[in-house]
Amino acid sequence: MLGFGEKPFLGIDLGSTSVKVALLKKSKRGYDLLNFGMVTLPPDSIVDGMVENPEAVVDGLKKLLQAEKLVGYKQCVFTISGQSVIIKKITVPLMSEDDLAQSIQQEAEQYIPFDIEEVNVDFQVVKAEGELPKTGEKPPEDDDRQMDVLLVAAKKDILKDQITLLQQAGLKPIIADLDVFALENSFELALGLDVDDTFALANIGATTTNVNIVEQGITAFTRDMPAGGSTITEAIQKGLSVPYIEAENIKLGHLPSGTKQAEVVTYVREGVAALCKELSSTLDNFHKTSDGRVRRIYICGGGALMEGMESMMAKEMGLECKLINPFRNLKVNTKVFDPEYLETYGPMAVIAIGLATRVMDDK
């Protein structure tokens, strides 16, 4: 988290359909919202986390920074996600963080499907049986204590492409984060983490849904699902035999003349059911590896903005489902920000807000 007097980093969320930017300031009572803005991207500019139209993304980002008067802020935090990222929770013998850092490359080779030379590897100790040994200390040979480690590997070429793109927009990338971690950081800022609770966070993008299952206050299971808001749009498109763009407008409530609401609802529910089937499979995989049970689901992202999304997902999943409002615990100047706008588009700001809490050298 930010310390007093530190210049904040811009949180840059490059989504499939839009770019979002957020800026926070640490205050005595928490965080002040300095800025939040977003701009829509041309279709297929970013597909499954891969930038397919860098010129459009750079242009959109430059215009957004100018419109929000953020050109003077250079240092930023960004995310990567999708098939280029691997996250695994592994169990290893208890050791110091320095010893783990030296052995993590070898550990990673057992769990990632990429050549180890093609990826950057990082880790975070999430739970240990006792205190971690200090640097240079070795546990006794008969010590069978273990620790759980979150292992992260990201392809170097994807990181390089993202960094180059941000530099072309006049920014200085400082930290690369993951959507699932930014999601958890934003949620913690808004609602806190209950160590006695187990719940799922789902950031529903256009084509991908980032899922982070939090158990006892820490990340226990993550997955980037190959389903999102477009799953619902495609169900409408197929059911009504209309172009994709028209189906997207219908999903957002803009019904053309002659189209019956009841018919649309039928296809919307089919799309939501397909999305929830994928989510149910994700929760089932978690339940196979843990004694905990997911009690509720918190949703965000552009796909969460559809009217009735919470209730439809709750019915399909058989679990309580709530929207995440990342502005909930931020100090907001209502003379600068429209509260209604923030309330409406809050679910789309979650990743950017989570990124804006990051500082140098934290994990």
Image: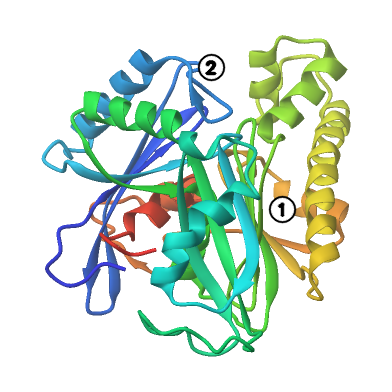
Quadrant where the C terminus sits is bottom left
How far across and down, in percent of the image, does residue 211 sit? Answer: 65, 52
Secondary structure found at label 2: loop
Is residue 279 shown above or below 130?
above
How far across and down, in percent of the image, does residue 287 sit? Answer: 83, 65
Task: Single out the mark in the foreground, 1 or 2.
Answer: 2
Using the rendered view, name the quadrant where residue 321 is placed: bottom right
Q: Is residue 235 left or right of residue 150?
A: right
Real-space Cα distance between discs 1 and 2? 27 Å
In the rendered structure, find residue 310 and report the number of the disc placed on it. 1
Residue that badge 2 annotates: 44
Residue 347 seen in this snapshot: yes
Q: How is the image coloured?
A: rainbow
Dot 2 crowding, Cα within 10 Å, few <14, some 14–19, many 20+? few
- Residue at 59% x, 80% y: name it: 194
Dot 1 crowding, Cα within 10 Å, few <14, some 14–19, many 20+? some
How far across and down, in percent of the image, does residue 290 sit? Answer: 79, 71
Is residue 263 shown above or below 36?
above
- Residue at 51% x, 75% y: name it: 192
Q: Earlier in the sequence, mark 1 or mark 2?
A: 2
Q: Amino acid at mark 2?
A: Asp
User: Which sits in the foreground, 289 or 341?
Assistant: 289
